[in-house]
Image (cartoon, grey):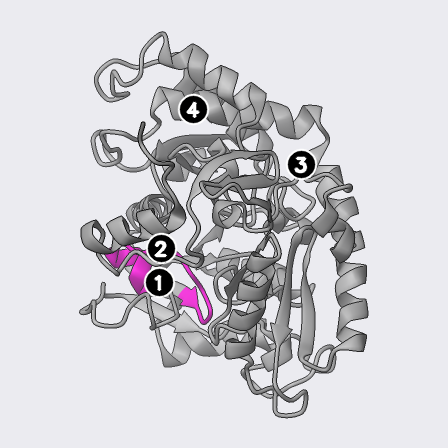
Amino acid sequence: MNEPVTSKDLNERRSKAVPRGPFNIHASFTARAEGALIYDVDGREYVDFAGGIGVMNVGHCHPKVVASIKNQVEKYTHPCFHVNMYEPYVELAERLCALTPGDFPKMAMFANSGAEAVENGIKVARYYTKRPGVIAFEHAFHGRTLLGMTLTSKVKPYKFGFGPFAPEVYRMPYGYCYRCPFGLTYPHCGVYCADYLETFFGDHVAAESTGALIVEPIAGEGGFIAPPPEYFSKLHKICKAYGIVFISDEIQTGIGRTGKLFAIEHWNVVPDIVLSAKSLAAGMPLSAIIGRREMMDAPHVGGLGGTYGGNPVSCRAALAVLNIIEEENLIQKAEQLGKKVRARFESFQKQFEIIGDVRGIGLMLGLELVRDRESKEPAADEVKAILKYCHEKGLILISCGTFGNVIRTLMPLVIEDDHHILKTVI
């Protein structure tokens, strides 16, 4: 009989067969997972506050998702939508068009990853407007493909050594109140960071040459940064005035994480195009591009697509996810549990000088750690130590932020209040 495999054994095998580029936060290997719990091959149990980096909003191996996948796999797995169409693709498109903000006609198409959603959203905007320019933001993350990497702000590790990058991408400061790029203080600033877009047109790219502005409602990888309340309405108004397509990247913020199905709804702003992925299909590879009908339908036949985009198994998983979100009231749960977690985090902030800022919405919350509250020197090494300590104690956490000094919470929305680690937090 073979000896039981261990994380040590698998790490040795990994070091020989897998390059160092694909990073690993923790050295453990998963054996199984359920709800908000992960069990490794060494028999240890962990409470999961990472959720596969925001992918498992409905939890690991939700029975309804598993059943939906099994049912579809027994029928067909990949006829390719471009060759022989199938109902799950159309049904999911209909559902998402009805659920995304805006009472205008919409259309949706599917790809495999968040980065592909970003690429296709930009393609649609450029084709529709006939303008090449794209405005992205500091602290943004939009993927690891050439265009996605170009739109992404953080250089190391995402962009370093991988240039040259795609042309016609312009970067604007983001509404990061804790570290205001203009040295101002909210609300006395008048939200100048949004009004600056008008100045940006004169210094960087003309409005008439700009096809799209792409923005995360809460900057995810950049540090869980939630801009001031007036920020998006101002940006949206300017974009509308100049005919610029407003794209909301909801890849990490969407599918209930913030207490709304899509985070941009918190600001009553209606994007032209919404991008979704991650928790959309509970771990199955699927992303969606949903937008105004006239925009989505502009590219010529064959101009959009991809072999695996909208795979029927992934579509069925996504349909199950949307049902679960509604049936189990997970949006309301995210809002309610988020209030509890924020209250505890704010109490931590009063207790520990190292916590410089608590921010976010719903269960998308971040703790920015600093070595000094006056200088705001990032405490990146301290964050690494905390992550390691928590992992040893049975809690999986991950970090983010341009300076690597933010602890973020991405626990499944189905997490139970009686999980012992969750009790410690709330």
Q: Whole-Å distance between the Cαs marked 1 and 2?
A: 8 Å
> Is label 1 in contact with label 2 (beta carbons under 8 Å)?
yes
Of the residues shown, which amino acid type is indicated by label 2? Gly
- Give the magenta part as a residue range: 136-150
- Return the mark for residue 82: none
Q: What residue type is labelled 3?
A: Val
Q: Callout 3 environment at 10 Å: few (<14), some (14 to 19), or many (20+)?
A: many
Q: Where is residue 137 in the image (x, y as percent from the top left)?
A: 45, 68
Q: Earlier in the sequence, mark 3 or mark 1?
A: 1
Residue 198 higher or lower than 296, as above or below = below
* Residue marked by disc 1: 151
Q: Is residue 99 left or right of residue 76?
A: right
Going from the N terminus, do you reach mark 4 or mark 3 first? Answer: 4
In the image, 199 versus 167, the foreground residue is 167
**First of labels 1, 2 by sequence position:** 2
Pointer 4: residues within 10 angstroms few (<14), some, or many (20+)? many
| Residue 224 appears in the picture as rendered | no
Which mark is on residue 414?
3
Q: Earlier in the sequence, mark 2 or mark 4?
A: 2
Q: What element carries label 4?
A: helix
Q: Do the residues labelled 3 and 2 touch (CB within 8 Å)?
A: no
Q: Name the residue under label 4.
A: 315
In front: mark 1 or mark 4?
Answer: 4
Q: Position of residue 258 (x, y in %)?
A: 66, 48
**Residue furthest bottom in the image:** 375
Q: Which of marks 3 and 2 is in front?
A: 3
Counting other residues with Cα less than 10 Å from the Cα at mark 2, is it few (<14), some (14-19), or many (20 or more)? many
Q: Say whether marks 1 and 4 touch (CB < 8 Å).
A: no
Q: In which quarter of the image is residue 19?
A: bottom left
CA–CA distance between discs 3 and 2?
27 Å
